[in-house]
Image (cartoon, grey):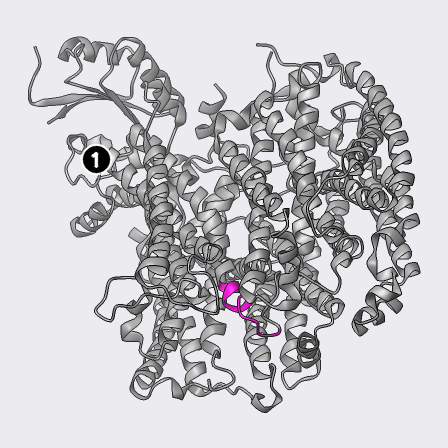
Amino acid sequence: MSPVSMEKLNLMAPPSTQIIERRSLTVGILFGIGALVLAFVETDKFFHAYLLAYMAWLGVSLGSMAFLMIHHLTGGGWGMVIRRPLEAAAKTTPLMAILFIPIIAGMKHIYFWLNPAAIANNPHLVELRHGYLSTSGFIFRAVAYLVIWIGLAWLLTRLSATQDQPPVRNLSPRFRVIAAPGLVIYAFTITFAVIDWVMSLSAPWISTIYGFIFIVGQCLSAMCFIVIIERILARHQPMSVILRSKDVHDHGKLMLTFLMLWAYFSYSQFLIIWAGNLPSEITWYSRRLYHGWHWVGLAMVIFHFAVPFCLLLSRPFKRNVYTLVWLAGWLMLMRYADLFWYIEANFNERFFVTISDVVLPIAMGGFWLWFFFRNLRQRPLLPPYALHARELVEAIHE
Amino acid sequence: MKDEKIYGLMAEFVSPEAVVEAARRTYQAGYRKIDAYSPFPIEELSEAIGFHNNGVAPICLTGGLLGCIGGFMLQWWINTINYPVNIGGRPYNSWPAFIIVTFEMTILFGGLAAVAGMLMLNGLPQPYHPVFNVPQFSGVTRDRFFVLVFSTDPQYDPVETRRFLEGLSPHSIAEVPA
Amino acid sequence: MVQAIEVEPGENKAPVMASGHTFGSITDKVSAMVLTRPLTKGWIFGFAICFLILQWMLYAMCWLFFKGVGVWGVNIPIGWGFAIVNFVWWIGIGHAGTLISAILLLLRQSWRNSINRFAEAMTLFAVACAGMFPIFHLGRPWVFYWLFPYPNTMNYWPNFRSPLVWDVFAVSTYGTISLVFWFVGLIPDLATMRDHAEKKWIKTVYGMLALGWRNSTRHWSRYETAYLLLGGLATPLVLSVHTVVSFDFAIGIVPGWHTTIFPPYFVAGAIYSGFAMVLVLAIPIRKFYHLEDFITPRHLENSAMVMLATGWIVAYGYAFEAFMNWFGGDQYESYVRWNRIHGPYAPWYIALLMCNILIPQILWWRKVRLSNFWLFMISMDILIGMWLERFVIVVVSLHRDFLTSSFGMYYPTQFDWAIFIGTLGFFTACMFLFLRLLPAVPIFELRSLLPEAKAVEHE
């Protein structure tokens, strides 16, 4: 029983991550070529799937950034061990900015309100089209959101990087100065962003809880992703030493919390619209509860909520990263399926899956993971000169 | 040789570390019918006397499940069988609307079961208990800690057990009259 | 005994408890508040005033029973006046108590331990105040039990598709679980009171209430499990209660009510006003009962930060309700938006934005969060703001909805005001009695916060 010292630990990401980084890039390029072919073969479907894949991966980036800010505000050991993976994920925002370009290029294939004939019989939409939903407004706002997110991620990671050098410092108060307004800014920008990018697909349908559903969904995706990363790193130094089952337990609890919040928001939205039964609102659900889409909805209730919920109630299950990782992987798939139900039902009245729906998330994921692991390998997995990180390591006995 | 009128032997301690250590050693010495007392919950103390599974959680789960099933069945039975009324064209079995009351009933029965189960397993309310006969025992709600060996323990012996407890360097030792 | 607890180095955060205390000194200090402290003039005076206000409420209620709900200002189109405004306001205030005792328990936040007892008491009294309003609003309050499903000679059942029936279940479950939670938390401290009381009859009363609790470690083990389970159950419960309250509005299709953000936005608003009430009570209590050692600036600052966070969720709610209504372009919803700003109740709406959104922003400054005076003033401001919010939601939506021919105005009468202010008297009178009769700070949980108690864990 001797205390571990920070100096003796090799804090850099293990070499195995380099292999994953390279393979991710290979997968990204291979599937990217496939996606490029699909862009010419089934252009419409390609762009629909592209938006879906983009929202799925953006969720991991922004959800991680949100967790990073929550960690800075609340403190606690659960956040310190995953701070660097969260930062690496938040730093993928520049990549997401580049990946947004095809959405702008393919706008005409995605957004029905760009087609004057489709909105001609709805004066309100015509008015919106010439005001808020104008092409330039859409692009301008998208650039603004992305710049804000990149800026936030940059501020958070830059300050954290100073803790790689001596002396030992406690920067918590300075992190809080960024994180507190940062969370507010994140909540507002992501809501405006999903109104533009996703909710407008069913315009003029609105649901005021829509932003919250996306926020908790992004946080859930991010926590699941982080658990997977923990599992990858868990067998090697330094994670094998610093990751305690207490922290994994906390991550499991956070998964459970956001899972319950997701269910709570989704159910509230459904109940209010179902009970109101107004023609302008219920159409959103009637589109998603017939023609095969109802199976997806039912699957969401069972496999996105009920089964994971029951599993997460178990304490031993949550405490063990090797069991928790399976559920985390499963839930990431379910997050994708949920977004599929939200986004693709706007395009197709009948439920079906295209090749693009499979190829594009993998292609984008390949690039995303390559960028993530590149970020992760640049810095130690624990900021060695952060006061709380030192306390964490000193508390561990071999 | 057991004195029928004696409930047990009680040793008093002044710090949580001392009582945990004493309880651990009493358990290791082979005493099984023992109890310990502390002014605030100490997880290590109940582990030290070999008490692990307290049985409250299953009772709570049972109560919650009963509330859940009962709550939903009540609404389902009323609205589809006993008193079906068409309200606003909604289906008789309006399950989206029934989830709320089902949920509340789950919480209500789960919570009440947890508390009732805790009190029942603890044997409370219990107006009289022999430990209160020991004058210094009132310190247990202030800053004193106690280890008690019941006279029903097979290893219990008035002389030997007292000697053993004295070896734990307690603040005081008292016989608990039944 | 020298070092303080849980100071985060380099951050000059106030400790959860002042240094220099022992198991004995904590016990003596808190139990003395009830057992040896004489009746002070301040207590008698304060209680007398609250009791008088309570009599005013009783007078108004007698008149209400005698004449009927017509003595209130409610009429078509505003059938839900003060009664529902006050119901939502009070039940929201209650939520902070459960939040502190249940959610912060699950989050292992040790700072909750000295304020949870009176916060839970606050919950109970607030739920009692809240419960009165819908029952009187029934018009025939003596048959309130018709709300519950029971086999009856009239052979009818409640309509389980109605959010008002959900409310009956949610609020009664909430009241029951809050009472049980509070009582379970009290049991070990009642035993402490029993052992420290001098007079025989006082000993007997506390002894009966303590159920024979004797601090056995087996009992503690089951106790902790049960308490944690209750916390785990009360957390979703508290969210569900205000969610159901929000459904009272959102399930209907009245413009301004029928919007999906209501559940989280109501819950956040509830916690917002609840923490404001916690501060309004905690600041005087810690001063007059000399509890500065146990209710430290840390508690006040953390509560202020919770208010800041929930205040922003409320602001988010206002912002996106307005923005999405505009985006959706529904004419009735647009009219509500216009009517809030330009209609006859516009001053109330502007005041609400000031009280709930603008003024609380000074909480961003740490100096404000650490100042008792400013915190007290902002908390009062938020309590007023949240009351105005419920007023705006209830009245402004109802007074002008779909048909211009059924537009109307709502003017509260003296009986509306008497019963509302009367519940404030009832609430404070109950708090005075609670402080006098029961340990206001959980003694056993404070004991476990001491460094000596924690020493065991590190073995």
What x and y, as percent, mark residue B176? 15, 25
Viewer-proximal residue among C245 and A108: A108
Amino acid carrying mark 1 in the image: Gly
What x and y, as percent, mark residue B4? 6, 20
Q: Decide whether residue A299 is among the magenta residues.
A: no
Q: Residue at x 36, y 49 (%)?
A: B108
What x and y, as percent, mark residue C456? 44, 23
The count of marks equals: 1
Q: Is residue A175 above or below residue A115?
A: above
Residue position for label 1: B123
Image quadrant of residue A37? top right
Q: Pointer 1 indicates a residue of which chain?
A: B
Q: Would you say B151 lies left or right of C334 here?
A: left
| Residue B147 visible in the shown view | no
Label 1 secondary element: loop
**Mark 1 neighbour density, 10 Å: few (under 14) some (14–19) many (20 or more):** few
Q: Residue at x 52, y 39 (%)?
A: A306
Residue extent of the magenta highlight = C245-255
Image quadrant of residue A4? top right
Q: Is residue A286 above or below residue C356?
A: above
Q: Would you say A33 lies left or right of C81 here?
A: right
Image quadrant of residue A381? top right
Q: Is residue A250 above or below residue A396?
A: below
Q: Residue at x 45, y 28 (%)?
A: C452
Q: Decide whether residue C246 is among the magenta residues.
A: yes
What x and y, as percent, mark residue C108? 51, 38
| Residue C230 visible in the shown view | yes
Viewer-proximal residue among C417 and C297: C417
Viewer-proximal residue among C220 and B68: B68
Q: Is residue C144 above or below residue A98?
A: below
